[in-house]
């Protein structure tokens, strides 16, 4: 999935990075565009892992002082339904990207 996200980001003039800090907080894919907009993506294989992915993504984002908040935050799964949490973290299956 991260490879496909990289292809999409490059088409928009951006790049994909992996984030991990010294406290062990991690984000699977941080998409950064040339205009400084950025987003954070947690990748989970099964829909049953979405709640854990949302929790981990929230914790990691709370540790980042990037000057600007992310334009989006998402948990992408192999299967499952799409929805948005109260704090605007989206979750959706990989196929929703239309790749």
Image (tube, helix red, strand yellow):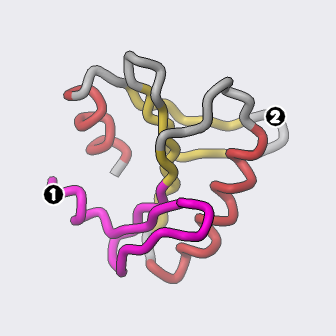
Residue at 74 percent across and 29 percent down: it is 65
Lateral position of residue 80 relative to residue 8, left or right: right
Q: Which residue is mark 2?
A: 22
Residue 95 percent across, percent down from the top left: 22, 65
Q: Nearer the viewer, residue 24 or 82?
A: 82
Q: Is residue 20 left or right of residue 77?
A: right
The residue shown at (75%, 35%) is 21
Q: Position of residue 32 (x, y in %)?
A: 44, 27
The magenta stretch spans residue 61: no
Residue 13 vertical position relative to residue 31 in the rendered view, above or below: above
User: Which of label 2 and label 1 is nearer to you?
Assistant: 1
Instruction: Mark 2 or mark 1: name the one nearer the start of the chain.
Output: 2
Question: Could you tell me residue 22's position as x and y percent?
Answer: 81, 34
State the extent of the magenta-drawn residues as a range: 74-99
Q: Is residue 12 left or right of residue 80?
A: left
Question: Residue at coordinates 45% horizontally, 79% vertically from top-left?
Answer: 47
- Measured Cα–Cα span from mark 2 to mark 1: 35 Å
Residue depicted at x 23% and y 64%: 96
**Is 78 a magenta residue?**
yes
Relative to 86, is 22 on the left or the right?
A: right
**Callout 2: SS:** loop
Q: Secondary structure at mark 1?
A: loop
Q: Label 1: which residue?
A: 98
Q: Which mark is residue 8?
A: none
Q: Position of residue 72 (x, y in %)?
A: 48, 47
Q: Residue 93, located in which quarter of the rendered image?
A: bottom left
Q: Are marks 2 and 1 in contact (CB under 8 Å)?
A: no
Front position in the image: 46 or 55: 55
């Amino acid at each position: 999935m991260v490879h496909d996200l990289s292809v999409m980001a490059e088409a928009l003039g951006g790049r994909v990075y992996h984030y991990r800090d010294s406290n062990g907080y991690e984000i699977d894919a941080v998409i950064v565009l040339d205009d400084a907009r950025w987003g954070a993506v947690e990748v989970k294989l099964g829909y049953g892992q979405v709640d854990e992915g949302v929790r981990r993504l929230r914790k990691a984002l709370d540790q980042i002082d990037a000057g600007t908040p992310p334009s989006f935050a998402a948990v992408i799964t192999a299967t499952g339904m799409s929805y948005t949490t109260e704090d605007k973290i989206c979750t959706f299956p990989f196929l929703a990207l239309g790749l």
